[in-house]
Amino acid sequence: MPVRCSRRFALRTGAAAVLAGVALSAAQTSSSAADAVFAQFFDARSADEQAAAIDRIVSTGIGVDEAVDRLRKGRTYARDAARGAVERSYRSAAGEYFYTLDVPHTYDPAHRYQVRIQLHGGVGRIESNVPPRAGAAGRLAGAEQIYVLPYAWKDAPWWSRRQLANLRAILDAVKRTYNVDENRVVVSGVSDGGTGAYYIAMRDTTPYASFLPLNGYIRVLDNETAQSDGDLYPNNLANKPLFVVNGGRDPMYPTSLVDPVIAHLKSGGVHVDYRPQASAGHDTSWWPAISGAFEQFVAAHPRHPLPDTITWQSGPADLPARAHWLVIDRLADAQGSEPRFTDVNAMPAAAVPDFGIRGSGTQIHRVLKGSNAEQLGLRAGDVVVAINNQHVGAEADVSEALRSFPSGRPLLLSVVRGGEPVRLTGRYAPGSQAGDGAMFSRSHASGRVDLTRTGNRVDAKSSGVAAFTLLLSPDQFDLSRSVAVVVNGRTVIDSVVKKDLRTLLTWAARDNDRTMLFDAALEVSVPR
């Protein structure tokens, strides 16, 4: 029999179909609007431009979870991006910065590429910010990857806030053009560049997977003539692994000088793969033999974008100070009854040899009365160019280079005095200078927070800090359940935290990182 429908039923079903069509059309319109504003967000040339798109994304009414999915997918990369040696620069309020990229000729935008930032040496010899020579000859050839060769000079050395910002800006620009594997970005360097890698590891750990100092020396950063920018905290090295190479015959930083420091870092919990080269000088002649181990180390140590443990220490000049999902916001006015930490900065206070000179690099500014240096005939104004017929680069620290010499060793110093060459001979017989028991001296008080996450619980050990912020990722925390924060044994927060679209977008713009997204921020006050 034919099926009969009442007129009222037909009207109801027709109206439902119309409403469903209207809802579908509205959803399509909303999706199209989200597509358009996210395209603007991803096409932005900087974090500032992305910030301007945040209000437009929020106005679409898109849900936080959908926004997370879109951010994880990320932008579409152009197939015609430049390859080979690519010369670039950008301008900031501090001036123009130059850098070179070396991009594989086989670059495929569908593939995520490892990145090595390679810091050059000889910073003290470069007087001004001039464009580097064309090409990518400064890199040490290794695995297929994108090489980034930034540029430093005397007034903007690697151990400065300027360069921390510079490397961040360059990496951000590279990630907007090329498909970068955010968890395989490393910082390496040779000589001054190696010393700079130590500095960056102690100041800005978040974007990087590991640090690989070659022919550098961390304690140069405590030399007053190096003028390292800001206080330094070797505890921060515990967050990322190090791959270190030094030469036994290096006249600047021989293994005899470096070995005790590496041993001390290891004893303090820093992961160091140390590869001393007994017969090497201050050069990279060892690279063909070491490059395989170097690249294996990099491959074996990708970055964990959301580590379950973090330790970070900072002083007032650099607040807010961040390490991944921890941000130290404010230091305490005075320390109360707080836990004690193992402090990598504390070293055995051993006496160190003192040759008797004070200067900058190879330039002698002052010679101490009655010292070994005065006995040999050194004078203020001398420039040391060779020690025992071994050339000394302008970036060398003469006192550090001599400390590896045994007392009584014959010494031949070649110096330039008033434009004329002078040869000074004698024996190395330094006096003694008491150590102060610290790797780095400091100008300000500091604060430190150590975090451990277990599920939705965070245990924090804090000293000298009044307030910090935890950035919560959907890949790390289940925000449908309560989040507990325990500080120095006291529960200070135990509640459900609401997801926030603006928080998600703000940090996504800053980090430009598909693997490190935060949909909530939790402000924590440290109990006194």
Image: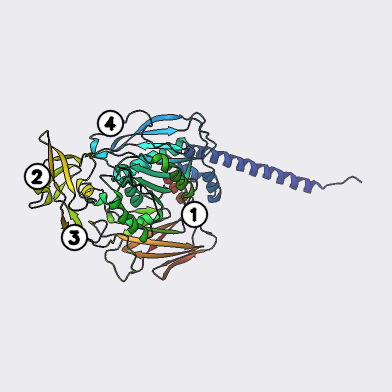
In depth, the one of 258 and 333 nearer the eye is 258
Residue 171 in view here = no
Q: Badge 2 is on which residue? A: 377
- Residue at image point 39% right, 62% down: 450
Label 2, secondary structure: give it: loop
Q: Indicate which disc, 4 or 2, sits on the residue closer to the N terminus.
A: 4
Q: Indicate which disc, 1 or 3, sits on the residue closer to the N terminus.
A: 3
Q: Badge 3 is on which residue? A: 434
Check disc 3: other Cα within 10 Å, few if <14, some if 14-19, many if 20+.
few
In depth, the one of 273 and 454 nearer the eye is 273
Q: What's the amino acid at mark 1?
A: Ser
Question: Which x, y percent locates residue 217?
Answer: 29, 49
Label 1, secondary structure: give it: loop
Q: What's the amino acid at mark 4?
A: Val
* Residues at marks 3 and 2 touching, judged by CB atoms closer than 8 Å: no
Question: Which x, y percent locates residue 151?
Answer: 32, 36
* Residues at marks 4 and 3 touching, judged by CB atoms closer than 8 Å: no
Q: Indicate which disc, 3 or 2, sits on the residue closer to the N terminus.
A: 2
Residue 87 in view here = yes
In depth, the one of 6 and 306 nearer the eye is 306
Q: Nearer the viewer, mark 3 or mark 2?
A: 2
Q: Indicate which disc, 2 or 1, sits on the residue closer to the N terminus.
A: 2
